[in-house]
Amino acid sequence: MQWLGVDVGGTFTDLVLYDLDSGSIRIEKVPSTPDNPSVGILAGIERMSLRLGNVAKLAHGTTVATNTILERRGAKTAVITTQGFRDVLEVGRGNRVVLYNIKATRPPPLVPRSRVYEAAERTLYDGSIRHAVDREEITAIAAKLAQLGIEAVAICFLHSYVNDSNEQATREIVANALPSAVVSISSEVLPEYREYERFACAMLNAYVAPRLGRYLESLRDGLARRGYARNVDIMTSNGGTWPIPRIVASPVNSVLSGPAAGVIGAVFVGQAAGYPNLITYDMGGTSTDTCLVKDGAFAMTTDGRIGPYPLRLQQIEINSIGAGAGSIAGFEAGRMISVGPRSAGAMPGPACYGRGGVEATVTDANVVLGRIGTERPLGGEIKLDAQAAYAAIERIGERVGIDAQRMAEGIVRLVVTKMTASIKEISIMRGHDPRDFALFAYGGAGPLHAALVADELGCPRVVVPPMPGNFSAFGLLVADVRHDYARTRVVSTAELPVEELRTILAELREEGRRRLAAEGFAPDATHFEAHLDMRYVGQAFELPVPVAERPQSMAEVDAAFLDVYRKRYSYAVQGPTEIVTFRLTAYGRVAKPALERTGAAGSLEAARSGERPVAFEGRFVPTPIYDRLALQIDTVTDGPAIIEEAGSSTIVPPGFRASVDDVGNLVLLRR
């Protein structure tokens, strides 16, 4: 039997096939099809000549929800909210969109004010109902929505995280009146306090649900026609996987689907290879995603955003910037050159793709510098055009009076600086020294720039895993099932008996146990972790604090908070603390692919596939090219060198040395 991981990116769709019997892995990369991503997926499956009847597991990372929000291509959505709170989504937090621009304006809301309706209901902060839902009023609102052709409805009532009976009653009425519409209630999407964030999540969930639902239905039908009759596991932002029916009900949880898979894979490979401290660096065609992993664990956050909108769901703390291989180099003001966030995408792509693109990109710059060869087609079908890349770089260079080589070097230097700044945000600005971490580089363009980024950061080691161009798809195959449960209740630790804390966590644990049991997980394949969102009394922000499921005392909880606070801010004082949200994570452990590798036969010279001039430090030097799959374990290669493989190339600059470890990672060290 086989497992298949499929990750859809902005430029390419990556597939990884793992054979359980032989332990072998096959990879494939095809251009993405943004209008209908399932077309690219099915094209990749056909190129692999894959019989889906032999596939026991199919995991998928999707960008449909993300792109729907960023491109504002979601469903025609309406919102029903508590009387007097019609403008919550429009006002938000009242902060500036751009900190130092007093003239900056907010983007128009995804749901215009004309489609936000008020209901004369009211739930108090303690969960008591002051005004129950007026069925006639809601029926009249639903009739208006039907006339408008509304496709999705978000129901967002005050304090519904404590008592959701009014939201449930409203959903029943609206669903009966609009049977074809998606209806989301905030108490299910995000059962936590802070109205703006909860309302925004519910609105986003409704906004993307119809499009994602249609896409997943199309994908499921296409797979079924090719013999796949099992479930498809969808990667979620928290690093776990959900079956399609649950994702369709709560699609906003898939917004960070692809980047999360890469981090999960990095932790898995890092543990196997003995690298517990990593900075993951995933550079694709459109963006770069970074995450800090310390002692084998990544940080979680509820303070995420998607475009201008808050995303307060549990998610891996990933820093994403618009800097990828397809990022376009252009002029900001006058002669000031910037790289990204605009991207050439999959169509037309960089100029060197020969598909009609004419603007200079990071990929074009690397072609001009000789760092990307033009002999091997990208994605199996895109033959790179060196002359087109040179012409695009030359045009932008002429505007500032420099030649194509210097312009290409400048573009690469700019994108490296941008990515380095992104990594500093999650390391130095959080009190972590990059010199204590290995830079774990993947994505199609990550290994191409990894040594340059590590050199600027001071990271002592670069680790490039096997199949880096398809690594997020591999991460899908090692992700466990994960469900997060939360209960908001603002209470001082001095006033909460430890027995009551244990009871709340036990109730959340039981919810998770029942769900995992329904999904077929035996007790010995489950795992639970408890966290509390805590703060000093009087603060307006919280920190996630890991605690035992059955803490011995509240003093133990306070001590855990102080420890977390001290690690984050380097200083903590004794003082009254409070719990804001009780959280429990339930894991269903899945089997993992083996990472054993046998060394390739032959010498270093046998792995050499050619030589070409490559630009380093302002001049072209003859540089040997090696086939990564032909390199033996413990092989040592001094730079300058380029190590090529399907989907990616690793640059070993002068002054660096590369070797292959016992699980197949390329490890780059400064000599």
Image (tube, helix red, strand yellow):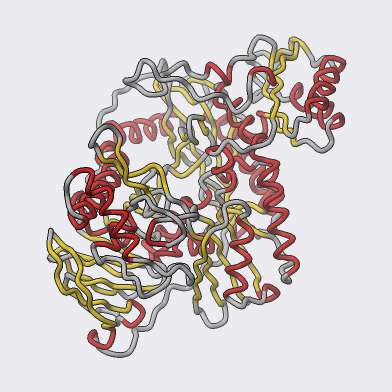
How far across and down, in percent of the image, does residue 663 sit? Answer: 36, 73
Q: Which of 26 and 383 lies nearest the eye of the viewer? A: 383
> Does residue 129 appear to the left or right of 429 in the view shown?
right
How far across and down, in percent of the image, does residue 241 sit? Answer: 59, 53
At a point 37% along the width and 54% down the height, the residue shown is: 325
| Above or below, 190 relative to 36 | above
| Above or below, 200 relative to 456 | above
How far across and down, in percent of the image, does residue 410 sit? Answer: 21, 50
How far across and down, in percent of the image, does residue 458 sit? Answer: 18, 51
Q: Quadrant of the N terminus?
A: bottom right
> Does residue 388 appear to the left or right of 356 in the view shown?
left
Q: Quadrant of the C terminus?
A: bottom left
Outermost residue, bottom side: 602
Q: Which of 568 and 467 lies nearest the eye of the viewer? A: 467
Q: Which of 260 and 147 lies nearest the eye of the viewer? A: 147
At a point 84% along the width and 26% down the height, the residue shown is: 173
